C-alpha cells in the first residue's frame, strides 16, 4: 500500500465525524497493548496556544538531551507534520506500516474508529516503537472525551479557556472549562496560563477532587518585554533574558508557560534559553516575504483574533487583508474585530469547510466597503501583492486550513 492509498483510507474515516467518546479509543489502544503507557507524557489542552506551547516545550526537552515525541493537529501542509520525534516528521514508510498494523486491529476487533482516533493511536504506537523519553500530546477538541484523554500524563497543562466549539463543548466558558479540566488525573501537577478567576476556580476544584496541585503562570513569574520586531522578541524573567522567533505578546506568554513547565521538570535554564530561541511554529504570525511585508496567521476563533489584532495595531500601512473563515466559526464577530484595521479586504476560501466567499463578502461590507472576491486562495494572495506597494503590510488570516493552503505554495 502506498502513502496516497493510506491517506485516502484515513481521510475516509472522517465520514464518522468527530465523535466525542472514549470507549472506542480505549478498545483501540487496548488492542495495541496500550502503547500510550510506554513513555512519559505531557498533556496540553486549551483554546489557544496549545501548539505553540507544545512546540516550545518539545524544543526545550530536546535541547536537554531527551528523545521527544510531539503530537499536534491539524497539519498545515503535510499529514506527517502531526507526529514528530525531535523535530522530524514521521516518515511515509512509518505511516504506511502503522496504518497496516492499526487497521488490522480495527477490523479484527470490529472497532468503530474516527480519523482522529486512528491518527492518535498511530502517534502513540510510533512513540512507543521509537522509545521516546517524553511525548507532548496536544488535545484535539475539548478534553474530557477527546481521543488523547486515554493517557495518564506526568504533567497536565491547560493554556487558557475561551468560547469555541460551543455546540459540542458548551455555551459558556464555565462549561468549556469543565470539559478541558477533565484531562486532570490523580496526583498530578497542573499548570495553566488562565487568568479568569471563575475558570481558575473550576480548575482548583478539579485539582482538589483529584488530589492534584494547580500552578498558575501569573502567580509564579512576571515577564518584561525588552524588544519586539518582525524577526524576534526578547523578554526578561527575573534576571534571565530570553529570545524567541515567534511574534506577538501572546507568544511570550506561551514561552513563559513552557518555561514554567520546564522548571517543574528541572530543566537547566541554559537549555530552556536555547530551546525557546530555536523554536519555530509555522502559520503563527509567520513572515513569508518583505517589501511588501506578507504575513500569515492561523487565528480562527475570537480569542485568537484578539491576540492578532493587538499585534496588527502595532504595524503601519495596513493595506490588505486576505480573509477566509471556516463555516463553523463566529463569522460576524471575527470580521468586526479584524476587518476595520485594513484599507482593503480580499475574501477567499480555504480548502476545508470554508464559508462561501459571497457570504463572507456580505459580512465584511458592514465594516469595510472596499471588498474584492477572489475564490482561489493562491490567486487572492497574488492579487494582494500586485496591489500592495513595497512598504505596505499584507496579512492572510481567518483559518488554519487557509494558511496551510498558502504555505503549500511557498
Image (spheres, rainbow, N blue to C red):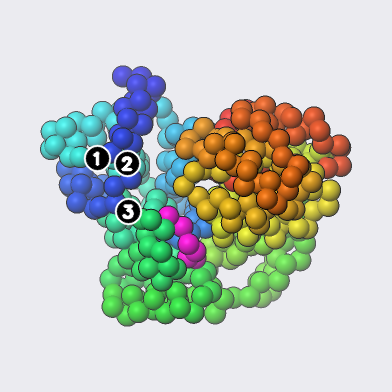
Mark yes or no: residue 253 visible.
yes
Give whichever of 292, 6 is nearer the camera: 292
Quarter-of-image position of residue 13: top left
Give whichever of 58, 344 is nearer the camera: 344
Q: Nearer the viewer, mark 2 or mark 1?
A: 2
Q: Which mark is residue 88?
A: none
Q: Which mark is residue 113?
A: 1
**Horizontal arrangement in the rendering, residue 318 relative to residue 49 (left or right):** right
- Dot 2: few (<14), some (14–19), or many (≥20) neighbours within 10 Å? few
**Horizontal arrangement in the rendering, residue 324 relative to residue 127 (left or right):** right
Look at 83% across and 52% down and name the residue there: 316
- Residue designated by label 3: 146
Helix, strand or loop status at disc 1: loop
Q: Which residues are magenta?
A: 159-165
Mark yes or no: residue 129 visible.
no
Q: Is residue 343 above or below residue 202?
A: above
How far apart are the two marked residues, 2 and 1, measured between alpha carbons?
10 Å
How far apart are the two marked residues, 1 and 3, measured between alpha carbons?
13 Å
Helix, strand or loop status at disc 2: loop
- Dot 1: few (<14), some (14–19), or many (≥20) neighbours within 10 Å? many
| x and y percentages locating residue 32 in the rendered image | 20, 42
Q: Nearer the viewer, mark 2 or mark 3?
A: 2
Q: Earlier in the sequence, mark 1 or mark 3?
A: 1
Helix, strand or loop status at disc 3: loop
Q: Which mark is residue 17?
A: 2
Q: Earlier in the sequence, mark 2 or mark 1?
A: 2
Amino acid at each position: 500500500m502506498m502513502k496516497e492509498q493510506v491517506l485516502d483510507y484515513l481521510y475516509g474515516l472522517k465520514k464518522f465525524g468527530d465523535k466525542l467518546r472514549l470507549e472506542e479509543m480505549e478498545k483501540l489502544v487496548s488492542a495495541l497493548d496500550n502503547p500510550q503507557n510506554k513513555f512519559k507524557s505531557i498533556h496540553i489542552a486549551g483554546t489557544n496556544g496549545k501548539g505553540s506551547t507544545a512546540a516550545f516545550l518539545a524544543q526545550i526537552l530536546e535541547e536537554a538531551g531527551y528523545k521527544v515525541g510531539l503530537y499536534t493537529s491539524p497539519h498545515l501542509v503535510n499529514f506527517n507534520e502531526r507526529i514528530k520525534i525531535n523535530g522530524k516528521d514521521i516518515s511515509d514508510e512509518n505511516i504506511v506500516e502503522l496504518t497496516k498494523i492499526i487497521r488490522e486491529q480495527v477490523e479484527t476487533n470490529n472497532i468503530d474508529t474516527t480519523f482522529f482516533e486512528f491518527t492518535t493511536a498511530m502517534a502513540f504506537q510510533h512513540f512507543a516503537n521509537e522509545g521516546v523519553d517524553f511525548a507532548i500530546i496536544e488535545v484535539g477538541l475539548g478534553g474530557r472525551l477527546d481521543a488523547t484523554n486515554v493517557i495518564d500524563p506526568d504533567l497536565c497543562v491547560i493554556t487558557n479557556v475561551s468560547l469555541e466549539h460551543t455546540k459540542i463543548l458548551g455555551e459558556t466558558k464555565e462549561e468549556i472549562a469543565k470539559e478541558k479540566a477533565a484531562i486532570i488525573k490523580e496526583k498530578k501537577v497542573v499548570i495553566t496560563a488562565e487568568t479568569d478567576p471563575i475558570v481558575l476556580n473550576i480548575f482548583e476544584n478539579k485539582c482538589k477532587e483529584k488530589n492534584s496541585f494547580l500552578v498558575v503562570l501569573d502567580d509564579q513569574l512576571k515577564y518584561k518585554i525588552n524588544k519586539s520586531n518582525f524577526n524576534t522578541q526578547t523578554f526578561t524573567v527575573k534576571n534571565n533574558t530570553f529570545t524567541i522567533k515567534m511574534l506577538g505578546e501572546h507568544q511570550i506568554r506561551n514561552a513563559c508557560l513552557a518555561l514554567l513547565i520546564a522548571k517543574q521538570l528541572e530543566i537547566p535554564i541554559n537549555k530552556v534559553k536555547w530551546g525557546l530561541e530555536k523554536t519555530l511554529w509555522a502559520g503563527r504570525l509567520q513572515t513569508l516575504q518583505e517589501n511588501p511585508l506578507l504575513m500569515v496567521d492561523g487565528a480562527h476563533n475570537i480569542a485568537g483574533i484578539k491576540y492578532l489584532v493587538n499585534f496588527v495595531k502595532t504595524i503601519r500601512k495596513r493595506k490588505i487583508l486576505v480573509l477566509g473563515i471556516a463555516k463553523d466559526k463566529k463569522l460576524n464577530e471575527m470580521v468586526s474585530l479584524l476587518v476595520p484595521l485594513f484599507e482593503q479586504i480580499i475574501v477567499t476560501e480555504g480548502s476545508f469547510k470554508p464559508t462561501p466567499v459571497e457570504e463572507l463578502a456580505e459580512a465584511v461590507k458592514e465594516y469595510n466597503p472596499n471588498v474584492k472576491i477572489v475564490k482561489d486562495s493562491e490567486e487572492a494572495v497574488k492579487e494582494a501583492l500586485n496591489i500592495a506597494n513595497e512598504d505596505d503590510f499584507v496579512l492572510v488570516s481567518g483559518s488554519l486550513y487557509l494558511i496551510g493552503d498558502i504555505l503549500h505554495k511557498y
